[in-house]
Image (cartoon, rainbow, N blue to C red):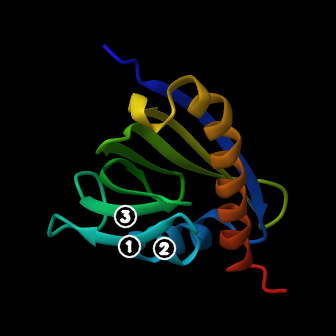
Amino acid sequence: MYASWVVRITVETEIAAPPDVVWADIQQISSHVEWMSDADTITFTSEQTQGVGATFDCVTKIGPIRLNDKMEITEWVEAETLGVRHKGLVSGEGQFTLSATDGDTTRFQWSEILQFPWWLGAGLGERIGKPILERIWQKNLQLLQSRFEPR
């Protein structure tokens, strides 16, 4: 039996907008492809496109690897938390957490616990995959931040 591998990643940034303004943007799930460089397309598989229970397929591409990530929204607290469950070849859970900081800024934290199949690298994938994903997601947060802080 081949072992899968698990990666735990948390990245965060501060955005110069209050949580309700950031939430108004990120609650539009289909717009995530605009700031997630690894998200190619999002297609809803439920009539519902927001809130707990909404489901969608997200085609994810990192280098030569292309996967269909089946996702379900599991947590939805307006202007605070958006949680998802991954149910494709890569499984696990993720969460965006928004919290107010000094002034009209938002601390945006993105946490994921993902389980990858053995054939995506096993031990090597864990050592190499985590830093790659951290860099991609940190860049994604910079892209999200730029939606509120044009240069």
- Distance of mark 3 from mark 2, alpha carbons? 10 Å
Residue name at image x 65 percent, y 64 percent: 140
Q: Position of residue 92 (x, y in %)?
A: 39, 35
Identify the mark nearer the N-term, 2 or 1: 2
How many marks the image carries: the answer is 3
What residue is pinned by disc 1? 41
Residue 129 image-quadrant placement: top right
Residue 44 image-quadrant placement: bottom left
Residue 119 versus residue 46: which sits nearer the camera?
119
What residue is pinned by disc 3? 59
Identify the mark nearer the N-term, 3 or 1: 1
Task: Answer left or right for 21 relative to 74.
Answer: right
Marks 3 and 2: CB-CB under 8 Å? Answer: no
What residue is pinned by disc 2? 33
Task: Answer left or right for 34 relative to 115.
Answer: right
- Distance of mark 3 from mark 1, alpha carbons? 5 Å
Residue type indicated by callout 1: Thr
